[in-house]
Amino acid sequence: MTLLAPALLLGLLGLAAPVIAHLLGREPPQPIRFAAMRFLHATERSSTQRRAIQDWPLLIVRLLLLALLVVVLTRPSSTEQTGVAVVGEPHDAVVLVDASRSMELRVDGRSLLEHAIDQVDGLLASLPPGSRVGLLTTDPDGPREEPSADPDVVRDALERWKTDGHPRAGAWTMAEALPGATALLQRVEGERPRVVYAVGDATARGLGSLPKAAEGGALVVPVPAIDAEQPRPEHVAIEQAHWEPAPELDPRAMRIQAALRRHPASSLDDAAPERRVPVVLRVGDTELARTEVVLPFGELVPVEFTHTLSSEQDLAPAVIALDVPDDPMPSDDTRHLWLAADDAIEVVVVNGDPSELRAHDEVWFLSTAVGVGDDEQRLRLRSLAPDQLESRVREQGRQAFRDVDVLVLANLRAPSPDVAPTIVEQVHRGMGLWITVGDRVQADAYNARLGELLPLRMREAVRVGTAPGRTEARAEGMAPADLAHPAFRGLRGDLGLTGTRARRVMLLEPDPQREHQIALSFTSGAPALLTREVGVGRVALLTTSIDRDWADLPLRPGFVPMISSMLGYLASADGGGGTGQLVAGEVRHFRTEQAITITTPTGQQLSLAPDDEGQAVLEDTYVPGHYRVDIGDTQSVLSVAVDPVESDTQWQALDPTPLQDGERRHVAVAVPRWRGLWWLIGLLLAAEAVLRLRSRWGGQPARRG
Amino acid sequence: MADREREPGGLPPPPRPAATPATSDGGDDGNALGRLVPAPLRELLRARPLLVRRPVWGQRHGRHAAARAGLGLDFRDHRAYVPGDDPRRLDWRAVARRERLVLRRTESEDELSLVLVLDGGGGMAYGEGPQQKLAYAHAIAGGLAWMAHRQGDPVGLSLGRQQAVDVSLTRPRSGRERLSALAQRLTEAPPLGRCPWISLMNEVAPRLPRRSLVVVLSDLLDPGMRSDDADEVQDELLRGLAQLRARQHDVVIVQVLHPDELTFPWAERSMLRFEDLRELRAPLEAPGRSLRDEYLRRLAAHLHALDDRCEAEGLVLVRVSTGQPVQDAFMGMLARLAGEAGAATVEVEVPA
C-alpha cells in the first residue's frame, strides 16, 4: 500500500483539534436565573467534571472521521505488479483491445474491459522511451489511432470510447481485427520492431483466436485482461430461441423454445452442481409465463412455452428472458422474437433422379430430414420434377419463384438454358439455391448455365481412390465442420458428420479469385459443402449426393441439423420466413425500389435508399431487439440476437508470451484503494449526527427566570 | 395628591397613570386590579367576607367585631354611671333592680385596616406567566385588597424593591381611588434588586393603625442585603414582625415559592450556570446533578426553621407554591386568618 500524497499525512495533526475542542471548547452552560442561590453550593466533583471529556463515543467518532478524511486525501493505492511484458527496445506498437461482448463479464465488480484498460495503462507506462504506440479495438466503430510518441492519445481515446457504453455485440474476433492492427503498423516508417499488444480475455474469439505472428512480421503479444488464476464467475445465457407453429393445439398456437446454458466459473470447487434459473416469456409488455429451469454446467437445456396469438394479432414482439439480476453478463440473458401467424420457409426441391427406392431418392431423405421434430412446421417442402419446373418458369417467368425461399436442385442434370437465367436472376434478388450432385449431374452444363452462381466451378465426378494420388483409400471421411461458418451459427461441438464415408465426389476447379466459404470438407481437404453469396442471395454446393448413391451422409446423426441449418441460412438472405433473426452485426439486404425506414429497438429511425441494383443494405444491427422495416405500405420485421458464441467465456490456454525474459518489464500499477473509504466516512457522519442528537435530546431544557 | 402622599425616606411614587374607570367591585377586566386577580379567584371571592380571628380597633364603624364597646345593638355589659355620661344610655331596668345608676354598654363593629407588605425584589421574578412568583403574590394581594374594599375596609401597600422602600400607600385608605392606586402601583413595579426588609419594617410599623392586618408576601429565601447577612436580616425581620404581633396586629406571612425551588428539577449531567436574580451572589456553574441533594437539604432546613420560628412568635405562616391554583392557596390563607389550625401547606421532599 502506498500513498500518492504522503505529505498530507501531516493533516493527522488535526486529530488534536477535536480533543482540544472537547476539553476546552465545551458547549456554553445553560444559564438559569435563580432566586434560591443562597442554598446552592458547588461540590468538589462538579469542579473537576468541567475538565473531563463528557462524550467519549462522540469524540471517538469525530477522531475517526478526521483520520479517515486525511487518509482519503493522501490517496492510498496498492501497487500491483502487472507482469506486463513489453519489448525492451524502442519499438512501434499497436494496442489491440478486445471489445467483444464477452468482455462485459464482471470480475470483482468491474468488467473485463475495465480490467483491460487498466492493463493498457500499465502497458503504456512501461513502454521504453522513444516507442510509438497506436490503438485499435475489435469494435468496427471503435477508435483507431495511428502510432505516435504520445501515449496519452491512446489513453484519451480509450476513455472516450469506454464512456460510449462498450463492449458491444457483433464485434470482430481478435483474429479478424489483427490485420487492421498490422495495417496501422505498416504505415509507420522505419525499421524498428513492430509489436501488436492484444489486450482482452482468453476466450476462443479473444486472445485464443490469435496467431503468434501477424502479417508483415509483427510480433503479437497477448495480454490477458486479468490473470488466468483470478477467479471468474459463472453466468447463464440464452443461446437459442425460436418458435414453431403448433396447429395441433390451435390454428394460431405456437411453441416458443429456447436453449439455456450455464457457463461455468473458472473454478467449480464451490459451485453448486445444479442451479435453478427463472425464465420469463413476455409478449408485448405483458409477462405471460414464468418457469424455472434446472441448469447443470455446460449442458444446453431446453425450455418451451406455448402461446396462442389472438385473432386480431398477426404479429407480436416476444421476449424470452432470464430473471437473474445478479448475472455478471446480463446482455445474453434476453432473446427477442417476432411471433407471426405465418412464418414458414418455402423450399422447392427439384428431384433430378426420382426413384421408387427410398435409399436412392433425394427427396425422401430431404423431406424426412425436414419433417423431423421442429422443422416440420418451419420448413414447407414441395417437390417438383424437372419438367414441371421448366414449364412453370416458361409460363410464369420470374413469378414461378414468387413464394420460393430456397430452391434445391437435387441430382438435376442441369437447368435448361432458358430456365437458368431466371434462376440466376432470382438468386441475385435473394433466393437461396442449393445444388446437390449425383450421377445425373452434368458439370459442364452447370458451369455454363449457372457458372456465376457456383462457389467453385465443377470439374468431374470421381470415385474416391481413383483420383490422382489417392489410390490407397476407397472412401472419403468427413472432417469436423467449420462452426465459424454462418450456416452453423449456434451449433456446437461435433455435428455428428465425421463418420460419413463418401465413395464418389465431385471435383471442383480451384479458383482463388472466386469468393466462397467452405462449411464442410473431407478429411483429404477437398471441399464437401461450399457456400457463396451472390447479390443478395446465397448458394450452396454439396459435392456428394444427398441420398445414399455416393455417400452415407443421410445416415449420420448430423444430417438433420445440417439440412435445417443450411436451409435456414439460404433462406435468411431473403428474410425467409418473414420474421428472420439476425445476429448482432450481421448485414441484411432488402430488395426494394423505394426507400425503406428501419425502426430500431432504441426507437431510432434509419432511412435506407436502394442502390442502382435495387438493394438497400442494413448494416447497423448491433443493438439486440425488435426491428421494424417499413417499405412503402408493407411492413416487415426482424429481430437481432447476440451470437451465442460471444457468450462463451471459457478461457483458452494461451501460449507463453513470445518475449524473452530480458524483455519483460514488470510495471507497478497504482490501484486506487481510497474509494471505498468514502462509504465509511458517510457511515461515520451518520453516526456522528445520531450521537449529537442523542446528546442534545438527553439534556434538560433550561428554564429561565 | 402626589405631594401629600409622599413619605420621607421613601421612593417617589411612580407617575400616576391616566385615570381609569374603576367599578365598584374591581372585577372588570379593564381594571388594573382585574388584570392582577385571575377570573376564577374573583368568581370565588365574590360573596365571601374577609374575616379575622381577633377583634379589631378601627377608627370607623365597620363589619368586624371591635375590641371596645360601642354603639351597636348587641348587649355587652353594665357599668356604674359617672358624671358626664350620657344619661340616655342609662339602663332604667337595671337601675331599678340594683337601686343605683348603671349604664348599658353594647358591642361595637369596626373597620379592619389591611396593610400589604410586598417583596418586590428580583427574586420574585422567577417563573413564567401565572407561575411567576410576583404575579402569584399580586393575585393574592389583589384578592385581599378587593375583598377589603368591597366590605369598606381601608387598605395600604408597602413595597420594597431595588434596595429602596415605597411606603407612599402604606397608610390604609378605603375607596375606589385607593384601590385603583394600589393596583396601579403593583402593575408598574417590576421585580428588581433586593428588598430592604429592615428599612421597610421600620417605615411600615409607625404607619400602622391599631390592630391592623399585616400581610407580608415574599419568598423569604434570601432576604439579606449582602451575600453574608441573610440569616441576620431574616432574624431581624421575624423579630420585627413578632413585635407587631405583640402590638395586637394580626401578622400573616405568605411565603410564595416556585415548584422549581421546591424540587430542583435539574438532575442531569449537563453544565448549568445559575445566576442570582437579586444580583447579589456570584454566578455558579456546575452540573445540576451535583447540586441537587445539597440544595434540597439546605432548603428543607431553612423552611423548617422558619416554621418553628413563626410558630414560636405567633405568626401565621402560609406557604404556597405557584404550581398550585391560586384560588386553593387563597382559600387556605383565608382559613388561617379565620383561626383554623394548619401548618405551611407546601413541603420539600428532602433526598435520603
Image: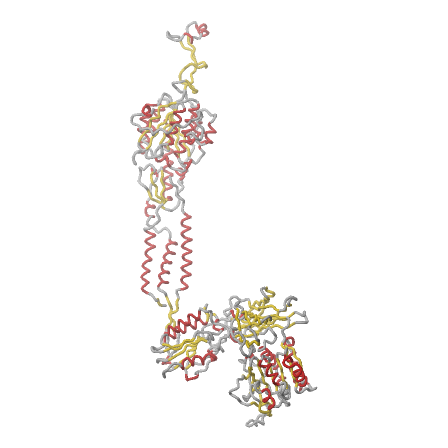
Judging depth in this view, the residue of B329 and A124 nearest the camera is: A124
Judging depth in this view, the residue of A267 and A510 nearest the camera is: A510
In the displayed structure image, the side of residue A345 where residue A76 appears, left or right: left
Residue B56 found in image quarter: top left
Position above or below: B133 against A633: above
Judging depth in this view, the residue of A106 and A424 nearest the camera is: A424
Quarter of the image with the N terminus of chain A is bottom left
Give coordinates of residue B299: x percent, y percent.
37, 36
Give coordinates of residue B307: x percent, y percent.
38, 31
Position above or below: B118 against A484: above
Position above or below: A439 against A612: below
- The residue under the point 39% across, 34% down is B133
Give coordinates of residue A698: x percent, y percent.
42, 48
In the displayed structure image, the side of residue A224 where residue A636 appears, left or right: right
Q: Identify the colour scheme used.
A: secondary structure
Judging depth in this view, the residue of B160 and B26 nearest the camera is: B26
Residue farthest to the right?
A: A356
